[in-house]
């Protein structure tokens, strides 16, 4: 596993070693009460910030109109889900609003090893499971401006029955208390503003000193050959003499 502060020199064109990224990917975790706008914002983030891979979860819930197997989710039978649990194939999994949801472990680890940043859109239970295992993930909580707005958004999305909407609204009062576990809170009132705030978090996290590409720093400022006072003159003499012969 490549450490974040890896100092191994990067391979060059004449160096046949496989490419080793200078840092692992960052794991971004976004949770929000259902209907807040998390899916909308996550799609916009992956479209507007380069280098993010949006993980696709497995679920036992039925697809909504317009959802595609392998795009929004991998829609699977409960028996298959439980087999995957038994084989430890999930990084985390949880029972949410009457269905199972899980994040596939291998795809996520592969991307992070390749230095690609990963975005997980998961519920609070799943985020807390990951928090116990992954120290330097970035936890972001999105909230609607009010319960009333949330109700309107759930109704206007028109993807859930009135009973299902009621169940989701009931859950908010429990979920909201988990905000303390998250490092950033975005209040999704104006969509454009929320996207800007999320983009700032993603970009700022990439600039953190602990994620610095040590190889770049070493090559440019530490291992760089010190040029002696005479070096410049010598090289210009050499260039000058070549020009003379031409
Ligand atoms: P979630 O993934 O959190 O359940 P969605 O992304 O499906 O929520 O959004 C729920 C509904 O609210 C959708 O119809 C979406 O278009 C709408 N929506 C999202 N963000 C906003 C916003 N800032 N203002 C108004 N409507 C929004
Ligand atoms: P929905 O059915 O509205 O797509 O999602 C319901 C809830 O399940 C949302 O809060 C969503 O974030 C969460 N969810 C989606 N995928 C996963 C997952 O892989 N793990 C967990 N723990 N929750 C998930």
Image (cartoon, rainbow, N blue to C red):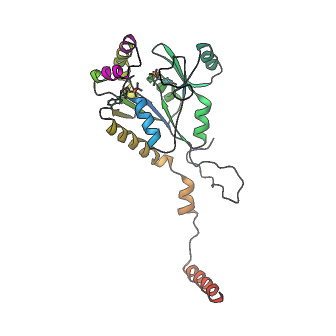
**Overall secondary structure of the magenta section:** helix
Residue at figure coordinates x 57%, y 55% from the top left: 215
Quarter assignment of residue 149: top left
Q: Is residue 188 left or right of residue 132?
A: left
Instruction: Kindly indicate the quadrant of the structure image that contains residue 238.
Output: bottom right
- 127 versus 222 height, above or below: above
Residue 197 x %, y % = 35, 40
Q: 192 or 199, which is in the foreground?
A: 192
Within the magenta stretch, is there residue 161? yes
Which quadrant would residue 13 be assigned to in this image? bottom right
Identify the residue at image location x=41%, y=19%.
159
**Ligand 1 position by quadrant:** top left
What residue lies at 43% left-to-right and 39% top-to-bottom? 45
**Residue 109 drawn at (x, y percent):** 60, 35
* Quadrant housing the N terminus: top right
Residue 163 magenta: yes
Residue reaching furthest to the front: 66
Q: Residue furthest right?
A: 16
Please tell me how many numbered marks the rendered image carries: 0
Taking 204 as reference, is 117 left or right?
Answer: right
Q: Quadrant of the C terminus?
A: bottom right
**Residue 219 in the image: above or below residue 82:** below
Name the one closer to the observer, 34 or 105: 34
Residue 93, position as x, y percentages in the image: 54, 21
Q: Which residues are magenta?
A: 150-165
């Amino acid at each position: 596993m490549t450490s974040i502060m890896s100092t191994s020199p990067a391979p060059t064109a004449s160096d046949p070693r496989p490419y080793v990224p200078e840092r692992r990917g960052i794991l971004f975790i976004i949770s929000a009460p259902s209907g807040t706008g998390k899916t909308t914002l996550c799609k916009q983030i992956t479209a507007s910030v380069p280098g993010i891979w949006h993980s696709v979860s497995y679920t036992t819930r039925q697809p909504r109109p317009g959802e595609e197997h392998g795009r929004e989710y991998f829609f699977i039978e409960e028996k298959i889900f439980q087999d995957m649990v038994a084989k430890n194939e999930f990084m985390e999994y949880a029972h949410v609003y009457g269905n199972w949801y899980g994040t596939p472990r291998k795809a996520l680890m592969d991307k992070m090893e390749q230095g690609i940043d990963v975005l997980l859109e998961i519920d609070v239970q799943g985020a807390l499971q990951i928090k116990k295992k992954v120290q330097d993930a970035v936890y972001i909580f999105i909230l609607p401006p009010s319960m009333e707005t949330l109700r309107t958004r759930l109704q206007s999305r028109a993807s859930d029955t009135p009973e299902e909407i009621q169940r989701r609204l009931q859950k908010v009062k429990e979920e909201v208390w988990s905000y303390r576990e998250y490092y950033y809170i975005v209040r999704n009132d104006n969509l454009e503003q929320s996207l800007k705030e999320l983009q700032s978090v993603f970009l700022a996290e990439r600039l953190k000193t602990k994620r610095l590409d040590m190889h770049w720093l070493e090559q440019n400022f530490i291992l760089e050959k010190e040029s002696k006072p005479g070096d410049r003159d010598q090289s210009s003499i050499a260039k000058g003499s070549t020009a003379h012969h031409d």
